[in-house]
Amino acid sequence: MDACIILNPEAGRGRARRLRQALGEAIADRGDEITLRETTHAGHEREMAAAAAREGWPVVVAAGGDGTVHGVVNGLLDVDADAALGVIPIGTGNDFAKLTGMGRGAPHVTIERLTRAVVRRFDVGHAAGEYFANGLGLGFGPAVIRHMTDLPRLRGFALYLVAAYRTFADYRPIVVSLEAAEHRETGPVMLVEIAIGTTAGGGFRLTPDADPTDGMLDVCVIRQIGRLEFLRYLPKVVRGTHAGLPPVTVFRTARISWHARRPLDLHMDGELRTIDADHLDVTLEPARLGVLCAG
């Protein structure tokens, strides 16, 4: 396997840094044409992925979490590269990695899986001049991500779960108008998740039936709910059985837009953004990205 691996040493709250030596040893043991490059600042993944694509690497691997994947995907698509994306999941949530079927494991195990992988064509979403590979959300999701910084000792899904409970205590719904060919509504909502993948936040199955190759965005809208409803419904969201609940609407579309009375915080693949506009279009680009998946 000829590949350029882009490692974010800060991923997984420092877990990637601790695995750096083992990853380097696994690469050396194979004897393949594999290079390992480390990011040094925010946004570096995007720059390095674009450079690797221009150099002609057939595979560019994101070693980190969903944020690392996000940067690498944008770098590859910035130059409209033919390179396939691989993932070594060492982040906190690893939601995108779940779509590849590669799973987590020791570096040498993961690299061996990559060498046996097959390339599938994944859809990507686009909004505000940026691509997303797994999901875009507004409302409760971005608020949870902000609260995660107050929980330095937690990792993995437990981090997202505790942050979700804490966030709800002072969360206020946002008022938006959503417009898609398949669904329209205006009013207060708790969250909107526009997804290519099945999970967000490390394990919340907001769009459990999503397929990254079906040419559609899966949208989950959860309207304003009270504290007791939140406590009762959250386990259903984790299991992906929430679609029939009264405050929930799930649908598929190729394009959705929203209007709001104020700039809104959102996340793209877990990366926080603030859109300083009262209108945003979210579109899908089908089969845009080649991804290494378990055969």
Image (spheres, rainbow, N blue to C red):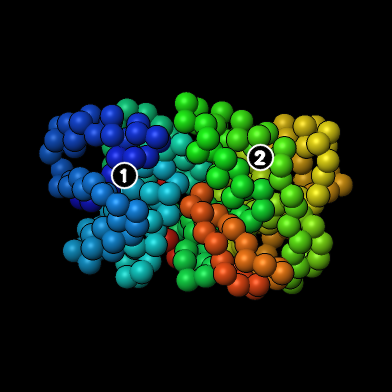
Type of amino acid under label 2: Thr
Q: Residue at x 52, y 31 (%)?
A: 151
* Mark 1 vs 2: CB contact within 8 A: no
Nearest the eye: 66 or 151: 151
Position of the C terminus by quadrant: top left
Disc 1, SS: loop
* Vertical relation: 200 (above or below) 60: above
Question: Is 177 placed above or below 248 here?
Answer: below
Whether residue 286 appears in this view of the structure is no
Give the residue displayed 40% in from the left and 34% down from the top: 13
- Find numbered disc 2 in the image and state the secondary structure of the residue it sits on: helix
Q: Residue furthest right?
A: 246
* Image quadrant where residue 19 sits: top left
Which residue lies under the disc numbered 1? 8
Which residue in the structure is indicated by mark 2?
167
| Res. 171 visible in picture | yes
Image position of 207 (left or right of 271): right
